[in-house]
Amino acid sequence: MKLTLMGFVGIFFIACQQNPSLNSASRDIEINQKVEELLSKMTLEEKVGQMNQYSGFMDFTGPEPDKGQAASKLEHIKKGWVGSMLNVHGVENVKAVQKMAVEESRLGIPLIFGFDVIHGYKTISPIPLAESASWDLKAIKRSAEIAAEEASSAGINWTFAPMVDISRDARWGRVMEGAGEDPFLGSKIAKARVEGFQGNDLSSPHTIAATAKHFAAYGFGDAGREYNTVDIGTTTLYNTVLPPFKAAVDADVKTFMNAFNVLNGIPATGDEFILRDILKSHWNFNGFVVSDWDSVGEMVNHGYAFDGRDAAKKAVKAGTDMDMESYHFIEELVSLVDNGEVEEKSIDDAVSRILRVKFELGLFDDPYQYLSSDREKQTVYNSKFKEDVLGLAKKSIVLLKNDNQLLPLSKENQSILIVGELANDKTSPLGSWRIAAEEETAISLVEGMKTYNSNNKIKYVQGPKLVNGDPKFIKQLKINTTDRAGFTEVIQSAKDADVVIMNLGEHGLQSGEGRSRAEIGLPGLQQELLEAVYIVNPNIVLVLQNGRPLTLNWADKHIPAIVEAWQLGTYSGLAIAEVLFGDYNPSGKLTMSFPRSLGQLPLYYNELPTGRPNNPKQEDVFRSHYIDEENSPLYAFGHGLSYTHFEYSNLKLSQTASKSIQVSIDIKNTGKYLGTETVQVYVRDKVAQISRPVKELKAFEQIELKPNQQKTIDIQLTEKELGYYLPNGDWIFENGEFEIFVGTSSSETLSEKISI
Ligand code: BGC
């Protein structure tokens, strides 16, 4: 203990206080010196300890570990054999564990506490896919800032977010956690989220380190199946998968997380090419890489390592710096170094990276700076977050269809029937990564509609159950497919209603990690219920709550109004009610294509042209098409209606420099309501060294217009937007002809061509 305390004091001495007046370059030098000094005092065991991360047993975010290991984990902390904990949160819990590291280990190096603060800590924002549909970068950044503020008050220093995986396959459950299918928008959102979490000053106790995950290509698993093989070419890797990761590095993200998948035959956790060559060398990333949960150990299952020892060796060699929950680093690395199988300089590099982030977080200045119970009490669930979190929930809603202007609903004298188990669920809207939020803390749709001040008669009937039993984060949900109890009551009530709000979709735990689906229609008996109600009362507003694009062909054909309300978090019901009654004019736009049929997946708007494009007028079959379905999505990337209408005209292009194009367009609000429009600009490089997509988003701008108001938007496209990556990773810009599309979605645009 005496030795420990001395070590602790010693570290404080070398750490000094971080001097905020120093500019960032000299602060980096100062921190690097401190890291070196500390490193020189560490034994090999202590160094390897920094590379070891354990889960505390508060929440399981991976396969449940053997409980017997709990005690040894605490012993390891005291020995300095642990660098980080995940899944320990709340000031009292974190303090107890931090004290062991700081006061009982020889050098007293503080732990860094990580947690999956994905879209909120306890106050929950919309799921990331929903947030992305707002296309509102400021609001998205603010959402991350709020998450950081709340989580840091509960002792968390580091979040495993943002997930910046591009995903084109709605079967994959984790599409809910990303920003959709587009690398350009995905990069902007990656930057916004990193900046929101990390703020301007990482050493402030109100900000937390962010993680760009999962490196790389986790969203491209074959057949949309979780943890499955990824086999993609380098054109897709450089142009589609990597840009959001690069944007995160440019935004100074402090950590990266490995992906579970094999990428072109090599597990991402052991992939020197992406970790060392691209990330650490080419991009000059100087933060650290944490594995995913046991992804080091899983290299054995992949058939890439003989055993845990071999896996540890390969992971470190490739550039993985910290091991989450596989135990192989702590068990094997010391002897691997002693035997000369791993160079100590690789260990030193990994540890320096980890220590640097700890210094930057201010943990050496005061390891307890995140640990104020008073601040935690004042911050968690603070209603001061409501305006922004609710605001983003409204912005995330996408109006998919609105025939005959059924929406907005009248506020007077209507009898409104709300149907569906989800409508009364106060937990499901928190989504899959509800994390530290208490159960039942979301405002349900029924609550939102009932508290909304309208002169309507509102009745709720649940109808058949969606889920049997008690939903649990780590367990498979049991969807009801047989018990039709409740059908009759719904149908009777629907006959008497002026309008029926059917709140259908997926339970919050039907998407997320480990929740791939082979069918992506409305689960359980919901489709049957929808059709049964339609027979007695077709005046239906379908409000969807779901974590992925769904197949909605029947609904699109028959139901007059469809609102995509995702899982919107704590204030879900309020946000939906405001949109349904027209206090907020919906402005969200899809960031993933909604397929007509499962067979179209993977589906994405920015596909390459084919040699035999589909021409429906052509009578022979020799064209790229389906004989039983259209090629186009049901709802395209960028689609989203408003209660008003925007008219686009007067698209003009001009060349402003040898490598840039000026785009100008007029947009007019020709409807009756004030509205926000997201003006989208897409580019096609007509002929290039490699075939280029039929359309790629390269700019967007949000404008608010009053009825009859018109604005001209001017957007500059430069070499940065007009160039692309060759298969060898080189960036290239080529002069030639470009087609520019501007419009309200990827499928509704005006277009012009220009040669530069
Ligand atoms: C997920 C990560 C997550 C980690 C820790 C893994 O199963 O893939 O995204 O951060 O668990 O909870």
Image: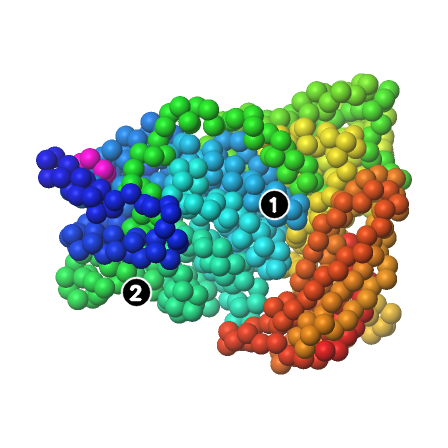
The magenta span reads: 101-105
Q: Position of residue 232 (x, y in %)?
A: 53, 68
Give the total number of marks visible in the rendering. Answer: 2
Residue at the image position 85 percent from the left and 30 percent from the top: 536
The amino acid type of the residue labelled 1 equals: Lys
Is the magenta region chiefly helix, strand or loop?
Answer: helix
**Which of 192/538 is in front?**
192
- Which quarter of the figure is the N terminus placed in? top left
User: How far is mark 2 from mark 1, CA to CA?
Assistant: 39 Å
Q: Decide: marks 2, 1 in contact (CB < 8 A)? A: no
- Badge 1 density bin: few <14, some 14–19, many ≥20, Cα 10 Å: few
Nearer the observer, 405 or 223:
405
Image location (x, y in percent) of residue 144:
52, 42
Is residue 57 at least partly visible in the picture?
Answer: no
Secondary element at image label 1:
helix
Which residue is rendered at x = 47% and y = 46% of the image?
200
Mark sitting earlier along the chain (2/1): 1
Residue bearing mark 2: 317
Q: Is residue 209 above or below residue 747?
A: above
Query: Looking at the picture, which amino acid does disc 2 mark?
Result: Lys
Q: Nearer the viewer, residue 710 or 80?
A: 710
Q: Quadrant of the C terminus?
A: bottom right
Report which residue position mark 1 lands on: 138
Q: Residue at x 10, y 35 (%)?
A: 2
- Compared with 444, 237 (above or below) is below
